[in-house]
Amino acid sequence: MNCPDCSGKLEVARSCRRVRLRCQACGREYQVHEVAHLLDPETEAVLERYTCIIYD
C-alpha cells in the first residue's frame, strides 16, 4: 500500500492502544479510517490480526 502524499510504502505501526499506518519514506502517520479506501489485500491481512482497532 502506498502513501497518498509521497507514494512511499505504508506499514502497519502498532503501539499501545492504537494501530496506525506509517509511511516509510516521509514518516507521516494515518489513522486506518483515513486510508481505508486504499487498503490492499496484504495490508488488510495484517489488520485482520487485530481484534479491535481504536479510532482516536
Image (cartoon, helix red, strand yellow):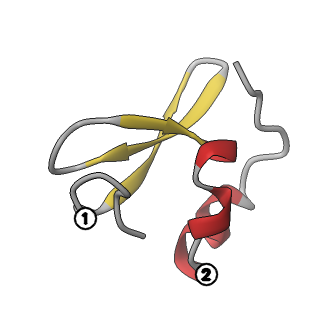
Query: In the displayed image of the protein, which residue is found farthest to the front?
Result: 5
The spot of residue 19 in percent (x, y) is 59, 35
Query: In the displayed image of the protein, which residue is found farthest to the left?
Result: 25
- Give yes or no for contact between labels 1 and 2 (Cβ–Cβ under 8 Å): no
Q: Residue at x 35, y 67 (%)?
A: 2
How crowded is the residue under tag 1: few (<14 C-alpha within 10 Å), some, or many (20+)?
few
Quarter-of-image position of residue 41? bottom right
Kind of residue at badge 2: Pro
Is 30 situated above or below 23? above
Depth check: 21 or 50 in front? 21
Mark 1 residue element: loop
Position of the N terminus by quadrant? bottom left
The spot of residue 29 in percent (x, y) is 40, 34
Nearer the viewer's eye, disc 1 or disc 2?
1
The label shown at residue 15 is none
Marked residue nearer the N-terminal end (1 or 2): 1
The spot of residue 35 in percent (x, y) is 58, 53
Is 40 situated above or below 36? below
Quarter-of-image position of residue 40? bottom right
Mark 2 residue element: helix
Taking the image as shown, residue 13 lies to the left or right of residue 33, namely left
Taking the image as shown, residue 8 lies to the left or right of residue 55, namely left
Residue labelled with disc 1: 7
Is 49 situated above or below 51? below
The label shown at residue 41 is 2
Mark 1–mark 2 Cα distance, whole angstroms, equals: 17 Å
How crowded is the residue under tag 2: few (<14 C-alpha within 10 Å), some, or many (20+)?
few
Taking the image as shown, residue 6 lies to the left or right of residue 56, namely left
Kind of residue at badge 1: Ser
